[in-house]
Image (cartoon, helix red, strand yellow):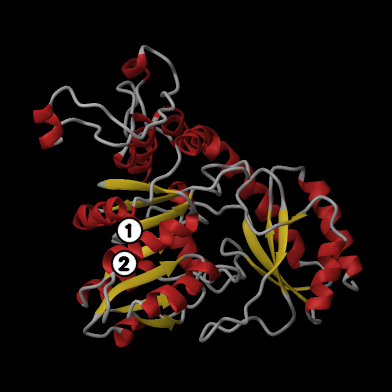
Amino acid sequence: MSKKIEMNAGANTRLAHIGNDPHDYFGFVNPPVVHASTVLFPDAETMASRKQRYTYGTRGTPTSDALADAMNELEGAAGTILVPSGLAAVTVPLLAFLSSGDHVLIVDSVYNPTRHFADTMLVRLGVEVTYYDPMVGAGIADLMKSNTKVVLTEAPGSGTFEMQDIPAIVEAAHKGGAVVMLDNTWATPLFFRPLDFGVDISIQAATKYPGGHSDILLGTVSANEATWKQLLACHGALGMCAAPDDVYQVLRGLRTMGVRLERHQESALAIARWLEGRAGVTRVLHPALESHPGHAIWKRDFKGASGLFSIVLDGGDAKKAHAFLNALRIFGLGYSWGGYESLAVHVQLDDRQVAHAPQEGPVVRLQIGLENVEDLKADLERGLAAAGH
């Protein structure tokens, strides 16, 4: 961080300056984009000892250090690794802390590709996988086994936005000797700092709000002091490094993330409250709404809400969800989120084991982008009309 910026400065001030000091690079505001594989050593002795800052492209460059340093400041972390995608940000720490014969507890409202990795790769590697109710709280102690090494959380839950009592889960998991990980992509460290609540490892799909423009794949994993060395060792062993141009674009995206999140939050809440009163919508799944079952936890632990939430249509099946989606003109139909444009997708929840899907009708997830709220409301009206309301 620039020496002129105080650590207790406001979020937007810090975002504008964290990650690099321009005076380290002849005064240029942005750090250099270093494309590197080979790094030269001044002599054979230094090469043998590897006692220099950079040794090979996979082990870091000034570009990757700039983003990692920025994330460390945002997360309050001992260290951060950068990986090529949000999914890799989940899989690398799981591989770092799980071995054959271990047991992992994963929240049942987890991101579906995480579940796929657990049910295929982890199971094949001899790891026992159990999915738990996102509302379990301190009751997770009853699910812990002597070989439980990791508890994976996600708050709010993917698709259905259940809120987890993270402090209670952390306390129980740590008593059982497990490492706690949290997928914090929805909130970003601006709205929730997992490590401040005892979580060991904070995961982000930087593809989403840090990148912010729907054109980059990147993941970050930030660790506390106790877990950092083991995470870093696994990262190096896997060679799972991120490309310099993508790293630079995410660092650039961070500069405006606070301003964008303010708009995402404001617009999403306005639309969510409006949808609560619309015919054809039986429920709005948004933790910042007073009607949400997890609202008290969200209000206690989080500083804000992003632009992603779901609605439950009033009756019908996939055909009704498709009619709603096909009538939209501004909302794109796409799986990602966190960019400047609004998106919608029919949420598939048939993989759930204990956190059952809403029964009233199909669930549609909405990403509220940076468009004008009234235009988005008119588009959603088109969808609801097409769906039969």
- Asked if the residue at tag 1 contacts the one at tag 2, i.e. Cβ–Cβ closer than 8 Å, the answer is yes
Task: Identify the residue at the far top of this view.
Answer: 26
Image: 151 above or below 341: below
Q: Callout 2: 10 Å neighbours few (<14), some, many (20+)?
A: many
The amino acid on which the numbered mark 1 sits, given as a three-letter code, is Ile
Q: Say which amino acid is labelled 2.
A: Val
Is the C terminus in the top left, top right, bottom left or bottom right quadrant? Answer: bottom right
Q: Residues within 10 Å of mark 1 (few under 14, many from 20)?
A: many
The numbered disc on residue 180 is 2
Q: Residue at x 38, y 70 (%)?
A: 152
Front residue of 300 and 260: 260
Residue shown at the point (46%, 49%) measured from the top left: 84
Q: Is residue 145 above or below residue 325?
A: below
Point out the residue furthest to the front here: 44
Q: Position of residue 34 (x, y in %)?
A: 40, 28
Across and down, in percent, residue 270 comes to 70, 53
Residue labelled with disc 1: 201
Could you say whether the residue bearing mark 2 is in a helix, strand or loop?
Answer: strand
The reply to whether residue 180 is in sight is yes
Q: Residue at x 79, y 72 (%)?
A: 321
